[in-house]
Image (cartoon, rainbow, N blue to C red):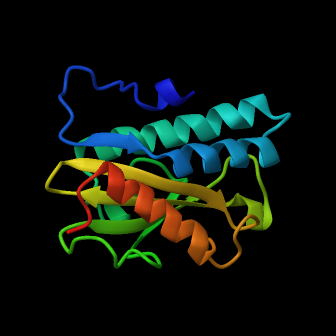
Amino acid sequence: MVRGLLQTRWSNISARYKIDLSVPFLSSFKELKRRFYKKQAKRLAELEDLIRRVVQIFEHEPHLSTEELRRFSSRLKEIQDNPSNSTEFDKSWECKKLYFVCPGLRRAASMGRLIYAVDPNESTVYLALIYNHVQHPKRPPDGLMNDTWKQIKQRGNGNG
C-alpha cells in the first residue's frame, strides 16, 4: 500500500511537490487500518483510495482552501492551519490538519484527521500523522507530536 500511495494517475503532468511519508505517518496509518479495518477489505480499499487522492492533490497543490479541497471528494471536509506543537518549524513552513470522513465507520470513528507540513523551500509535503477521533478525541499527545515534528525536521530543513 505504501508504494501505491505514491503512484499517481496524472503521470503525464509533472508533480510540483514531493511527498514524504514519515515513519510516524506510516505507523499511524498501519494502526488505523489494524484497529478499524481489519475485516473490511472493501472499506479499507476506499480509505486507501481517499488517501491516494489526497497525495495526488498535494503533489500538485498543497495550499488549497477548504472549498477547493471539497471539489475533489465529498469525504474531504476541512483544512485547519497550524496544529498543536508545530511552532518549532521555520516560519516558511505551513503545518495543517485535514479533516476527512473515514469510509465505512460511524460516529467518532468516522472523523478522520491527517496532519501534514509543507516545506516550500524544498517543495516537499511531509505527511505526519493520520488518525480518527476515537484514537485521539482532542488531539494526539504532545509527546507524540513533538517526536513526529522532530523526525520530520531531521528529514527536511525545518529547523530554521
Q: Residue furthest top?
A: 12
Q: Taking 51 as reference, is 156 left or right?
A: left
Q: Looking at the picture, tell me which residue is in the foreground, 54 or 127.
A: 127
Residue 149 position (above or below residue 155): below
Q: Taking 129 as reference, is 125 left or right?
A: left
The residue drawn where x is 57% and y is 77% is 142
Residue 6 position (above or below residue 85): above
Mark yes or no: residue 71 visible. no
The residue drawn where x is 45% and y is 75% is 83
The residue drawn where x is 36% and y is 38% is 56
Provide residue 103's location: percent of width, then percent of height: 68, 47
The residue drawn where x is 75% and y is 67% is 108
Q: Taking 160 as reference, is 129 left or right?
A: right
Q: Looking at the picture, tell me which residue is in the foreground, 15 or 73.
A: 15
Residue 76 position (above or below residue 107): above
Q: Residue furthest left?
A: 121
Provide residue 155's location: percent of width, then percent of height: 33, 49
Give the number of marks: 0
Provide residue 50's location: percent of width, then percent of height: 53, 41
Q: Looking at the picture, tell me which residue is in the foreground, 112 or 27.
A: 27
Mark yes or no: residue 80 visible. yes
Quadrant in which the C terminus is drawn? bottom left
Quadrant in which the N terminus is drawn? top right
Q: Taking 150 as reference, is 158 left or right?
A: left
Residue 127 position (above or below residue 112): above
Q: Residue furthest right?
A: 39
Image quadrant where residue 89 sits: bottom left
Q: Looking at the picture, tell me which residue is in the foreground, 34 or 89.
A: 89
Provide residue 154's location: percent of width, then percent of height: 34, 54
